[in-house]
Amino acid sequence: MEEYQGRKILVKVISQQGTCVAGHMAGDEFIISDMCPHTMCAWAFYTLFPFAQVMMCNGTFPWEKDPDKCTVACPDPGNPVVFELRRGR
């Protein structure tokens, strides 16, 4: 497996239901590297970061059809925000 060399992960909100306390809405975009973007909810970041780390190291997820993409939901089940993570080039 190739080591992480500053690879970034592009994150996009693909759906949002209820009231997101952080104000995230469908269409919002972020770039994840090794730190939480200042406009991203920290709870969402902590949920997404393990998946982003796998992608940064060229790992894949067997349940995803596209090896360069992963879909992850925030931890608030009453107001779910769903994010798409895409490997940057």
Image (tube, grey):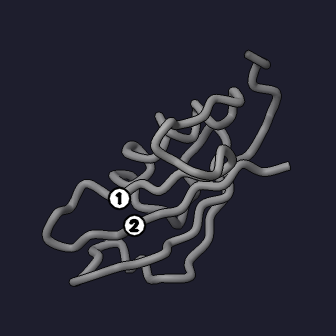
Judging by the rendered image, the residue that carries numbered circle 2 is 82
User: On the picture, is 83 further left or further right than 6?
Assistant: left
User: On the picture, is 43 further left or further right than 26?
Assistant: left
The image quarter containing residue 55 is: top right
Identify which amino acid the numbered label 2 is placed on. Answer: Val
Q: Earlier in the sequence, mark 1 or mark 2?
A: 1
Please determine whether, in this image, residue 5 is positioned above or below residue 16. Answer: above
User: On the picture, is 4 further left or further right than 27?
Assistant: right
Q: Judge the density around disc 1: few (<14), some (14-19), many (≥20) Cα neighbours within 10 Å.
A: some
Question: Is label 2 in a helix, a strand or a loop?
Answer: strand
Identify which amino acid the numbered label 1 is placed on. Answer: Ala
The percent coordinates of residue 54 (x first, y second) are 58, 31
The residue lying at 56 percent from left, 82 percent from top is 27
The image quarter containing residue 37 is: bottom right
The percent coordinates of residue 39 (x first, y second) are 53, 66
Question: Pointers 1 and 2 in contact (CB under 8 A)?
Answer: yes
The residue lying at 71 percent from left, 30 percent from top is 58
Judging by the rendered image, the residue that carries numbered circle 1 is 73
What separation in Å lies between label 1 and label 2 (alpha carbons)? 4 Å
Please determine whether, in this image, residue 7 is positioned above or below residue 11. Answer: above
Q: Check residue 21 in the rendering and tell me which mark sits there, or answer none.
A: none
The percent coordinates of residue 4 (x first, y second) are 75, 25
Name, please, the residue furthest toward the left.
Answer: 78
Name, please, the residue furthest toward the right.
Answer: 89
**Viewer-closest of 61 and 14:** 61
Q: Judge the density around disc 2: few (<14), some (14-19), many (≥20) Cα neighbours within 10 Å.
A: many
**Viewer-closest of 55 and 29:** 55
The residue lying at 57 percent from left, 41 percent from top is 52
The image quarter containing residue 47 is: top left
